[in-house]
Structures are given as C-alpha cells and as structure tokens.
Amino acid sequence: MTRYTRNELEISRLIGGRIEGLKEYAPEPLEETAKRLGLPQGQLIKLDANENPYGPTRHTLEALARYASYHRYPDPISRRLRQAIGEYLHIDPAFILVGNGSDELIDLILRLFHPDSQGRGISEVIDCPPTFGMYAFYGTTNDMRVLSLPRDEQFQIDVKAIETLCQRDPRPRILFLASPNNPDGQPLPEEILERILRLPLIVVLDEAYVEFSGGSRANWVPERENLIVLRTFSKWAGLAGLRVGYGIFPQKLIKALWKLKSPYNVNGVAQAAALATLEDLANAQATVEKIVDERERLLVKLREISYLQVYPSAANFVLCRVRGISIQHLRNAMEARGILLRYFDRPELKDCVRITVGTPMQDEAVLVVLRALEKEAK
Ligand SMILES: Cc1ncc(COP(=O)(O)O)c(C=O)c1O
C-alpha cells in the first residue's frame, strides 16, 4: 500500500476526472445585470428562466408569513405534502417522493442506479438534446456514460435510433424525456411514449411544465415498472426559489429511494408553501390559465413578425428562430430596454431565443422591440 506524507499529497489530482470538463453553474446575479445595463433592478423584465411572473398565491404568502417552525427539523418524508399531492393527482402517496426541486430527484435517480463495485447497476444514460441540460450534467457528475441521440429539426425525438440502440445492445439504460420539452415547449406524443416503454429502459418523464399543457402520464406509473414521472412546484406554482419537486415512482424503486435520500432534503418552509398552494388550488390554477391564455396571445403576435420562425408551445415559454437579423443585435436591443431572454450557445439552437411567457405588459415590451427590428430584417 502506498503511504503518503502530507507534503506528497497532490490534492487536485485526487479529484475525479469527470469534473474537468464541467463549468460552474453561475448565472449573472440580477444586481450585476442591472449594473451592466445601467438600469434599476426593478426595471428589468426577466423572461429567461421560465419562472411564473405572478409568484405564489396570496394564501401561500400568508402561510409563509405564519410559518413558525424555523427552529424545528422538517418532516423528512413530507407526509402532509405527499398526502395533498396524492389528492391533487389522484395517486396513492406511497408512489410519491418529494425533493429539493426536481433537479435533486434527477441526481437521486442516477445515484440509485449507479453501478456498484461488482458492476451491478446502470452505466449509461440516454439524453435527447436539445433538452433540459441537467440530465447530461448529472449523468456526467455521477460518472455515467451519456449517449446523445439528438432530436430532429422540429425537436422530435429519434425513436428509431433509440430502438436500434436497444436492439443492438440491449443493456439497460436510463432515458430522460421532458414533456413538454425545454426549450421548444412541445409535448411527447402518447404513442411514442408507449413504444419507448417497451424497451429495456428506465424512462424518466419530466413533466415540469405539464400544468400548462395538460396530459400528464403520472397515473401510468402504478401500472409500469420502468416509468418515473417528475413534477415540480417551480413553474406553475411560482415557487422556484423554494425548491420543491416530486416524483411518482414504481414501488420497487421508491423503497430504495427512501433509503438513499438525504434525511431533510426538503426544508420546512418549502413544504409549507407547497402544501398551501394545493390548499388554494383554484387560485393557483387561475394563474396557470392566465399564463396559458397569454401564451396563446403571444404565439399569435410572434407569428406576425416576419423574421421569426415560431415553434408551437404547450409550456410557459416560446422558442423562436431568428432569421435575417443577428441574434446578438436582437439581444442588444432587448437588453437596452432591460429585457432578459434566453439565448443558447449549442449549434442546434444557433439563432434561437426562448421567451418565457410574462404578464401581458411584459410581453408587450418584448413585442415592441421585436416589431421595431422588423425594418432592419433582410
Ligand atoms: C424540463 C425541466 N425539468 C426540471 C426543471 C427544474 O425544476 P426544479 O426547479 O424543480 O428543479 C426545469 C427548470 O428549468 C426544466 O426545464
């Protein structure tokens, strides 16, 4: 056995190689953006992260104001919240596990299947980009091989390629699919999901935006051994800052996940806020309806702009491809007015901009800038 003295220990060489290619996730803080743009922070129109512009319901805010258990550890198994989610989805709470945002659950699922020292487990993840970046990120941080099977130009997944891969080499893998998908906003057709579920795959269906589209498959889980559905309170419920997500898991998996998760992964304030949202469901859903109506209005108005190719969306954002003016020019024009949108550096999303559906006033500000640029488009 090698013995090291302290001086010989090269700490940086002890860190796993998988970290080397990663970048820190550190978006510019809003104060910094405001400073960079020379605008007061309150003047920024933040439509870059698919957040809910209305925030939580009044009942939820009141529940937060009344919260009095800061000095107590939270319920590690979120009993009351899981009960309420079960009623919301008409699913037995025994299938539900709550996490610190659905991000935590993506990581937890991968940790669950990560191969052990005898090689038992799953070593490959299938990612279908362009999609939510955290699937590939957590695949990498968990030392799994991430196989990339890209979508076509209309953002449809390549089912044939997935089937061929599974036929050629039928080792079990984990496949992540978002429905509606981020960044394009299109849902996964039911027949495609049926086909995929027949393969030797653990399918993680991420329904972060499903409240804006309808058509959840959460209630398929009790009937399928290889389907996991992820949901979140970040988008429809306006609780992105509190980090509450949940998963609906087959029984064989959830029993193992309970053992693996950190004891107090969901803090007490977050549990109280999510619970209050479900107690006030009619008002929370009224906000969702407002956003859906506004999305439809925005889609119509965006389609009137000649240099935009507007993709259909069933989520709370719209993806557009910009043709005839440079995306940097569009970005500069937006930022000059304090409007923050999401731009991409992936080649498949070159010249694309994703606009979160805001309030009618915020969206009107976006449309004013887009229309003003119309004269410059070639
Ligand atoms: C498809 C998708 N899944 C999950 C998340 C993250 O959800 P949470 O805030 O619950 O971690 C996002 C956030 O942008 C997303 O786009």
Image (tube, rainbow, N blue to C red):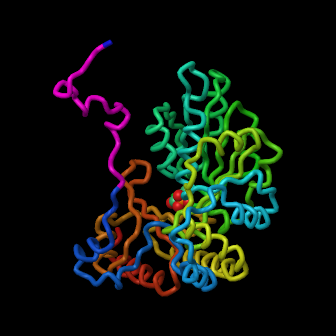
Picture quadrant where residue 335 is located: bottom left
Does 72 sit above or below residue 96? below
- Identify the residue at horizontal 52%, vertical 50% (top origin): 131
Left or right: where 76 falls relative to 50: right
Among the 4 quarters of the image, the one containing residue 48: bottom left
Q: Closer to the camera, 343 or 45?
A: 45
Q: Residue at x 39, y 56 (%)?
A: 344
Q: Is residue 186 visible?
A: no
Q: What stretch is highlighted in magenta?
A: 2-25
* Farthest left residue in view: 7
Snapshot quadrant of residue 108: top right
What residue is at 47 percent from the left and 69 percent from the top?
355
Q: x and y percent of residue 191 in the render? A: 76, 47
Q: Where is residue 291 in the image (x, y as percent from the top left)?
A: 60, 77
The total number of labels drawn is: 0
Side (left or right) of 358 relative to 168: left
Residue 5 position, x and y percent, is: 20, 23
In the displayed structure image, the side of residue 49 where residue 214 appears, left or right = right
**Furthest-front residue in this view:** 71
Does 286 appear in magenta?
no
Q: In this view, does 86 lie above or below 14?
A: below
Q: Is the N terminus in the top left, top right, bottom left or bottom right quadrant?
A: top left
Of 123 and 343, the residue lying toward us: 123
Task: Identify the image quadrant of the C terminus.
Answer: bottom left
Q: Residue 304 in the image: state x and y as whole percent.
A: 51, 76
Quadrant for ligand 1 reads: bottom right
Residue found 49% across the figure and 31% down from its top: 145
Camera sees residue 142: yes
